[in-house]
Amino acid sequence: MKCLILAAGYATRLYPLTENFPKPLLKVGEKTILDWLVDDIAAAGLVDEYVVISNHKFAHHFEEWAATRKEQISVVDDGTETNETRLGAVRDIQFAIDALKLDDDMLVIAGDNVLDFSLTHFIRYADSKQSSAIMRYFEPVEAKLRKCGIVEIDADDRIISMEEKPAEPKSHWCCPPFYYYTKADAQRIPQAIESGCGVDAPGSFIAWLATQTTVYAMEMPGSRYDIGNLESYKEVSSIYKGIVK
């Protein structure tokens, strides 16, 4: 299995910290965000290659970081240099697949979130379903629902519908940016883009995929800490204690 790490954004809301430095390499406690994520996944021994998808401006930072790790890590430079010219997450994923000729099951994760639970739970859930999968968590605040990917599910966790940033949310189930694609489903990304799938939010591909095949949504067994701006970075840095479950 490959792990694709989405890290091609420019994190403009975190300026000046990220004006010349990538958000995934900011420290939270004693480790960088990426080290928290990779340390957790690597401990399970289920991934044989990590692929960091970067923009051109920050690629050298990720290459320097990769050199400090013992895992097989490839850094893919998507060639963009500004927030205005970014490819979007879905096109970045396809860019990496094409660049490295990837042909495997894939764990696709945002490189700028930290979790207090192990992603191993999610990987094993998707494996048990033999299907592509996402995670979901209950969000009671309606204003926050309009800023997220929202999913409807049936009694067996199967996705009925999914929509990114809906004006009228159909449920209270939000989807964090962590996805599992089967090898066969990963090969459908070009078809999704050609069909008009959104490309900016990574969940847009899953929203399209769920209209084509069965995709499951596991309830998240803990908390996710999203670092969106300077205030949230300071808050997460002060309270995050690592994986506890």
Image: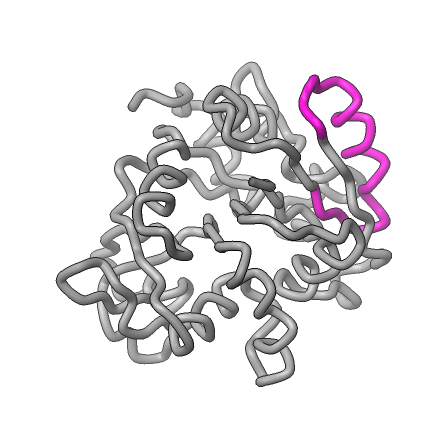
Q: Position of residue 115 (x, y in %)?
A: 41, 33
Answer whether residue 58 is magenta in the image.
Answer: yes
Q: Does any portion of residue 238 appear in the rendered image?
A: yes
Foreground pick, 74 / 143:
74
User: In screen coordinates, is 245 left or right of 235?
Assistant: left
Q: Position of residue 146 (x, y in %)?
A: 37, 69
Foreground pick, 115 / 212:
212
Residue located farthest toward the top when viewing the structure as drawn:
30
Foreground pick, 184 / 3:
184
Q: Is residue 1 above or below residue 245?
A: below
Q: Is residue 223 above or below residue 146?
A: above
The magenta segment: 52-72
Q: Position of residue 57 (x, y in %)?
A: 85, 47
Assign the N terminus to one quadrant of the image: top right
Q: Does any portion of residue 165 appear in the rendered image?
A: no
Which residue is painted at 48% across and 63% down in the image?
A: 203
Q: Position of residue 138 (x, y in %)?
A: 23, 53
Answer whether residue 76 is magenta in the image.
Answer: no
Q: How is the image coloured?
A: one colour
User: In screen coordinates, is 10 left or right of 209?
Assistant: right
User: In screen coordinates, is 119 left or right of 69?
Assistant: left
Which residue is painted at 47% across and 34% down in the image?
A: 114
